[in-house]
Amino acid sequence: MPDSPAIERGAHEAADEQEHPPYLRHHFNSTEQQADAASFAMWLFLLTEVMFFGGLFTAYLIYRNWYYQAFVSGSHQLNVVWGTVNTLVLICSSFTMAMGVWCAETRRKSGLVLCLTLTAILGLGFLGIKTIEYSEKIEKHHVPGLHYNISSFLYPDSDEAAKAAGDKPLPLDMARRTELYFSLYFLMTGMHALHMIIGIGILGYMIFRARAGAYTSGHVTFVENFGLYWHFIDIVWIYLFALLYLISRH
Amino acid sequence: MSEQHEHAHTIVGPKVYVAILFALLAGTALTVWASFIDLGFWNPIIALAIATTKAILVVLFFMQVKYSSRLTKLTIGAGIFMFLTLISLTLADYISRAWGSW
């Protein structure tokens, strides 16, 4: 059959026609090439995120060097126990996400749904703990703005956390700089939390789709790329935890 | 060609993920413990070193970069190099303007 469409399209394509899955876009040669391109693009996006958070980290670094005492006293207001628990929760969620990618790659549908659900639950747990921490700051008027209160830093004996950490009273100008610490604290953890909220939203969509068997028939790009995003959030938190919570605990 | 095909089919198994999970949990415990010891100048350096080790573990294994194409590795390397360059230049500017007050 010289005019059969298979031969017209070339012997090579005809040979692997059976392996042509419907999700292979026509502008890619192979599923490998398609997956590589998608992963490459995801990494480019993550690098823009690195630059975005990198700006915040640089601001933190400079102000921390200028107003070190204010940053130390400010960080003593954070609860290391909640911070540590949240770090563990997020690391576990990264693990369940990695397992989810594995389930998708090995076509385990119920395993994938379970892993994605656990990841979403751990993510919500993280946000719940963050809410507890934020509400403490709101109660003590440690949110930068008109109602910001520096008495914890001028009179550390009046403040439980400051007293426990053995803080010495800061001079007025340095005590005011704690507002900078909390500005960076809310900006960085807030942007991190926003990324988590977006991630949990996408997780909900993925759980819905995974239950219909969307990612367990060979096309795992979406799960893999979301995994990259979720692990990136984890990495940001690893640095935030070390820099915001553990400045000076000794 | 063969390399290109290999990485596309590499599937990292649960054993690796569990090992990395425990390494990350141990790293968290270590960094909290280290922060309560007075090491002076070294405290932030150790905290950042542990955080970076954890980040590298996540990138290499959870994010499967160890098994990725060279293009991906080069992209990430270039991005991190760019980031460190920008930080260094910014800090060099600030340090040299307020000379002595750092």
Image (tube, coloured by chain):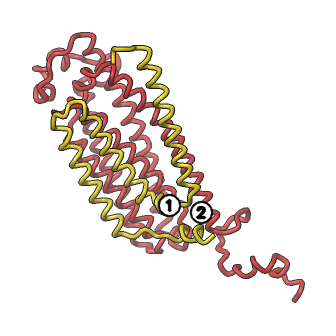
**Quadrant in which the N terminus of chain A is drawn:** bottom right
Q: Is residue A145 left or right of residue A104?
A: left
Q: Is residue A233 above or below residue A139?
A: below
What residue is pinned by disc 2?
A35
Q: Inspect the image, locate mark 1, and give the three-letter code of the amino acid beneath it.
A: Glu
Q: Chain of mark 1?
A: A
- The residue that label 1 is drawn on is A224
Q: Image quarter for residue A173? A: top left
Who's the residue at 82% across and 76% down the image? A9
Q: Residue A171 placed where, x, y %?
A: 21, 11
Colour yellow belongs to chain: B
Query: Taking the image as drawn, is residue B45 in sight?
Result: yes
Letter of the chain that mark 2 sits on in the rendering: A
- Residue A121 position, x and y percent, is 33, 55
Mark 2 surroundings: few (<14), some (14-19) or many (≥20) residues within 10 A:
many
Q: Earlier in the sequence, mark 2 or mark 1?
A: 2
Q: CA distance from mark 2 to mark 1?
A: 10 Å
Disc 2, disc 1: CB below 8 Å? yes
Residue A200 seen in render: no
Colour-to-chain, red: A
Same-chain check, marks 2 and 1: yes
Q: Residue at x 53, y 67 (%)?
A: B7
Secondary structure, mark 1, is: helix
